[in-house]
Image (cartoon, rainbow, N blue to C red):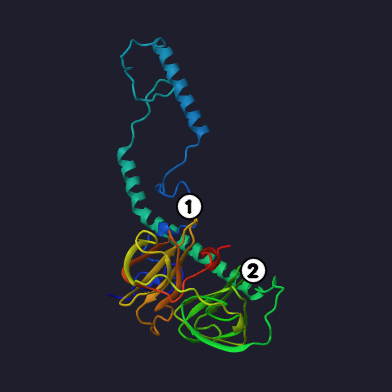
Amino acid sequence: MSKNIGTCFLCGGRVRNGICTECGMDNRKSDDSYRLNSGECDREPLTHVHVHEKEESEKKEKVKKAADSERKKTGNSTARSAGERPKNYGKYYHSSGKKPAAKKTGLWAVIIIAVIGILPNIGKSVYDAYQEKRAEETLSSIENLQDFQDSYDPYQYVDESIPEEGEYFQAELSAGYYQIGIDLPEGIYKCTRKDGTGYINIVDSEHNVYQYESFQENDPEEITDLKMFQGAVLQISGGAVFTLETENGQTSSMEEAEPNPLTDELTLEGYNAAGTDFPPGTYDVSAPDDFGLLEIELPGGGESPYTISFLLDSQRTEEYPGYSQEVRHLYLPEGTKVSAEGFEIKMVPSERRTSLDYKVYYGLW
């Protein structure tokens, strides 16, 4: 199986098994799945013409007047007997009573052939222009997001402070979800990327904190002054391994984790639902023998469900540093839909269960 089959149509990154290794876009899906702009004419031929209601009404009125005039001239203004078909049924005559000139069939055939010949080029030009416009819009959105992040203070609405005194604490973490006060103590942390590439999010609904940091090849290897309060959730994605350390860990305030009632390991493939195909709960998920895109659709989103995804691989490599070997503490409440198309995932119950509401756990506020 080839693991690199081209470039991503969205960002130009390398595509592996149909999935972009840079942005995670699923390039296996048709372009209809990612349409940014659409209209009622999208599926019409490029040569189709709109006829407005007013114009259509005017045409019908002209035809009716011409037909009435013709009937008066030929003495056929009275109603015809039931079932009798007019001699000129289905034909249109000018008001002068003369037939229009015969259609030039040969000329129309030449025109039609010419139009068919240029349609592919027109279609390609339109498609290329559409792709270029979409790429420009995406790049502009990324630049605007970057400008916003550079000026954004995630702690601007926080009135509380973390005590300066505490204990030294260090942990080495990879992809997963970690509760502050259970998995890590409250504290002010330094985060160092040890290996791979990835992202971290600090989600704290109580203090209205949402802090996002990128650790790609050209990003800084280290970020300091990460304030993580009791009750926050540290989310790590991608293939990076991080070292987190604090000098003022509030270990005395840590709570004891609730044991996970689940004990059975599962191997799943394709589409499965929590509560129907497997017990809901907290799992460590991996792809022990293959690689692929793991997609999680959480319940309660209505027409726009909240979806998270992970690129999983049995082995992390320098060629694909953004793939995760495992996602720890993945909370799958009842009704969650799990999709692993074309590969098997292993689901091992985590050492602890998740006590938070899943909307708080994933930052859906």
Residue at image coords 49%, 70%: 354
In the image, residue 61 above or below residue 242: above
Helix, strand or loop for disc 1:
loop
Q: Label 2: which residue?
A: 208
* Of residues 199 and 94, the one drawn nearer to the viewer in this rendering: 199
Q: Work out which residue is located at the far left of the displayed protein and give it.
A: 1
Q: Is residue 253 toward the left or the right of residue 297 in the image?
A: right
Helix, strand or loop for disc 2:
loop
Q: Quadrant of residue 283?
A: bottom left
Q: Label 1: which residue?
A: 38
Q: Quadrant of the N terminus?
A: bottom left
- The image shows residue 335 at horizontal and vertical percentages of 43, 58
Number of numbered tags placed on the structure image: 2
Look at label 1 and name its amino acid.
Ser
Q: Quadrant of residue 126?
A: bottom left
Q: Earlier in the sequence, mark 1 or mark 2?
A: 1
* Of residues 273 and 46, the one drawn nearer to the viewer in this rendering: 273
In the image, residue 106 above or below residue 10: above
- The image shows residue 339 at horizontal and vertical percentages of 37, 64
**Can residue 14 be seen from the camera position used here?**
no
Of badges 1 and 2, nearer the viewer stands: 2
Residue at image coords 33%, 21%: 89
* Of residues 50 and 143, the one drawn nearer to the viewer in this rendering: 143
